[in-house]
Image: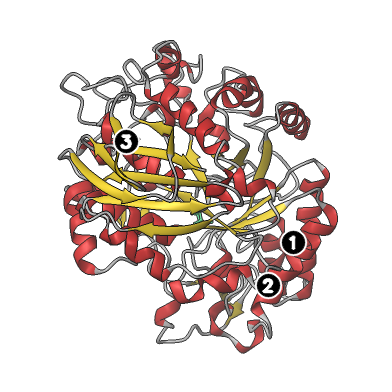
Amino acid sequence: MRTKTRWYQNATIYAIDVKTFADGTGDGVGDFAGLTDRLDYLAGLGIDCVWLLPFYPSPNRDNGYDVTDYYGVDSRYGTLGDFVEFVREADRRGIRVLVDLVVNHTSDQHPWFRAARSDPDSKYRDYYVWVDDPPEWPDPDRGPVFPGEEDAVWSYDEEAEAFYYHRFYHFQPDLNVANPDVREEIRKIMGFWLQLGVSGFRVDAATLLIDNKGGLESTRLDDPHGVLRDMRRFVERRGDDAVLLAEADDDPRNLASYFGAGDEVNVLLNFLLDAYLVAALAEERAAPLREVFDLLPEIPEEGQWANFLRNFDELNVGRLPKSYQKTVFERFAPDDEMRIYGRGIRRRLAPMLAGVSGSEATGGPPDESGGDRDRIELAYSLLFSLPGTPLVVYGDEIGMGDDLSLPGRNAVRTPMQWSAEKNGGFSTAESEALVRPPISGGRYGYETVNVADQRGDPNSLLQWFSRLIHARRECPEIGRGDCELLDTGDPAVFAHRMVGEENAVVAVHNLGESPTSVTLSLAGDPIRLFGRDGGVEFERVETGEWRFELGRYGYCWVRIR
Ligand code: GLC
């Protein structure tokens, strides 16, 4: 049991890409004005914290992860003034804001890189990683992150007459973090946004940030984790309760290192759990989920996992055993066009679980969410009951689909579907002006799947989601308790107990389609906290023994005093 609670341990995080969330100015691009207008929606949903994807000035060749100015708001999304208004309005509703910190690389249009390439004597030259001759046999552990889209990590720059290093796209030169001036820049950037009231940062590509860039002697850090420790110290000094939430889809054996001795990142995105959870959903068996608990390291007292099912990138299954990968691909991404980079799936959760693509436009929806409602509920109920802080991407609360006709990862980055009105209520602009086309027609089109319709319907997925988020808030045991896996005797049923200071929460999930019942030994009498309406019941069979009746993809959370 952890003794001290910090805000993020009992929060629900909601991920937003400003440009596709809500257009307040009518020019076809989402912006801070639109987002601020939707804060009451977010407050009603019950979320505690939003994570904003990059909104900084950018040529936008990698969805804003190619930054040209760390101190601004891209004019398409508003001004710094609009940002400050947003943070203030969020704060008034008790919602915290985390922003993406993309300092593994800049855009090649960033003034630092422009100076670096044009003048070898510029102090910015050494902000990046250069060689005259790239190694003939590139390090196999340091290949391109997006295979198929980039085939090298060294690109020649005509102006500089040298090769620069980039793990992502060629237009994203890596910053040389071994240079103390670069680390000073990172502190200044963090200081700026903290001063504007953010509660911390999602540290993009943390693994690569602290890597020995290009494998060169000149970029080798004596103490790579010192970079993260230094950032944490700074954030703690400058921010009121601010935190680091890091992206590190790393080997399981390295995961503990990002927490350090409780002095590096506070929260780590749980890519490993995501992959195994999806494997369990695909296999309809608890085994993969039980296995991941042996792979995940112990974390320090104030550390936390951020658990998610989907994000705005590919769903990476590359760390799963081959047999699980096979099932996941077969069940959730049967067509080639649904897969990406040889390791991932570019679909939203709802169509993945329903086995149908968002662009498949025929057939009446089985329910208002467009997907397999029972299975979506099962997946999210399970996610929210697992040790950690749940993270949801915008649109998943209404069961949005994907658009596989869009290139790459953009398939899951379509505009938020607010209503059945023009452009799904996202924008009043003409469709040619829209930043991305909203999904229209078919099971997942905005005409069928949207906030307005679901808001008025007590049985909607949206209303269910809000109940889930509120139930999770009432269970601090899940955020900071100890987790014990329970034997259920049924391979399809996963049950676990989260033990808090005084009480415990037991959650039971049937990953299978067939109804079943399991008997569990509970150390007290269960009180129902959350479950499918009318879907699951439990009864005492003996002293301390309780039988749970679980329907198709049934689930139930109870509290034990
Ligand atoms: C992270 C982001 C991804 C981006 C990459 C490069 O992985 O989630 O969208 O392409 O970093 O910044």
Give the labeled residue for mark 1.
Answer: 186
- In this rendering, the label closer to the viewer, 3 or 2: 3
Q: Nearer the viewer, residue 512 or 204?
A: 512
The correct choice, above or below, for 83 with respect to 166 in the image is above
Give whichever of discs 1 and 2 has the lower sequence position: 2
In this figure, which colouring scheme has been used for the structure? secondary structure
The correct choice, above or below, for 472 with respect to 114 in the image is above
Q: What's the residue type where badge 2 is placed?
A: Val
Which element is circle 3 on? helix
Question: Residue sitting at 83 percent across and 45 percent down?
Answer: 195
**Mark 3 lies within 8 Å of ligand 1 (Cβ measured):** no
Percent x, y of residue 62: 50, 49
Which class describes the residues within 10 Å of circle 3: few (<14), some (14-19), or many (20+)? many
Give the labeled residue for mark 2.
Answer: 177
Using the rendered view, name the quadrant where residue 139 is placed: bottom left
Report the quarter where the N terminus lies: bottom right
Percent x, y of residue 525: 43, 41
Question: Residue sitting at 34 percent across and 26 percent down?
Answer: 439
The circle on residue 376 is 3
